[in-house]
Image (spheres, rainbow, N blue to C red):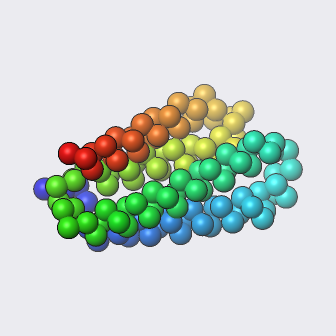
Amino acid sequence: MSFVTATGLWKAGASFAALGITTSAFGAHYLKAKFPQLTPQSVQNWQTAGSYLIYNGIALLAISQHPRFGRHKYAGPLIMAGTTMFSFSIFGLVLARERFGKVLGPVTPLGGTLMIAGYLALIF
């Protein structure tokens, strides 16, 4: 039994990719204008978070179509949870580090760990 269906994973992958493109475009064209106090490193961090949404969205699309999808029941949910935690914690840190840094700071590496676990789950 799988946590998610192939269709659900497909929709999540497409949503992540679309959101990644949207946030990356926002970061490239409007972020510095809307938040002039941001450092170049903060803008780069924003772009990294958007890129991870795109990359992992594409991976979820591929996983959802794999003929042995059912054998990898943990991979999709782990990648989805990890990507969400990783990218959105970075977005939050870029916009409100002083206010939420102590809460969001530890979320980023946890999200990265879940993404790695999701990809490792594809091996088994």
Based on the displayed image, in which of its 4 quarters is residue 24 positioned?
bottom right
Where's the N terminus, which quadrant?
bottom left
Residue 19 appears at what percent x and percent y?
A: 55, 64
Residue 30 appears at what percent x and percent y?
A: 78, 62
Regarding residue 37, the answer to whether it shows in the image is yes
Residue 43 appears at what percent x and percent y?
A: 74, 49
Q: Residue furthest front?
A: 123
Q: How many marks?
A: 0
Q: Residue furthest left?
A: 1
Q: Residue at x 58, y 32 (%)?
A: 105
Regarding residue 8, the answer to whether it shows in the image is no
Q: Residue at x 51, y 44 (%)?
A: 86
Q: Residue at x 29, y 66 (%)?
A: 64
In the image, residue 98 above or below residue 76 = above
Q: Is residue 56 left or right of residue 96?
A: left
In the image, residue 111 above or below residue 61 = above
Based on the displayed image, in which of its 4 quarters is residue 68 positioned?
bottom left
Q: Is residue 43 left or right of residue 65?
A: right
Q: Is residue 87 left or right of residue 100?
A: left
Where's the C terminus, which quadrant?
top left
Out of 91 and 67, give the one closest to the viewer: 67
In the image, residue 74 above or below residue 99 = below
Residue 37 appears at what percent x and percent y?
A: 85, 44
Out of 41 and 81, give the one closest to the viewer: 41
Out of 123 and 97, give the one closest to the viewer: 123
Q: Residue at x 57, y 36 (%)?
A: 104
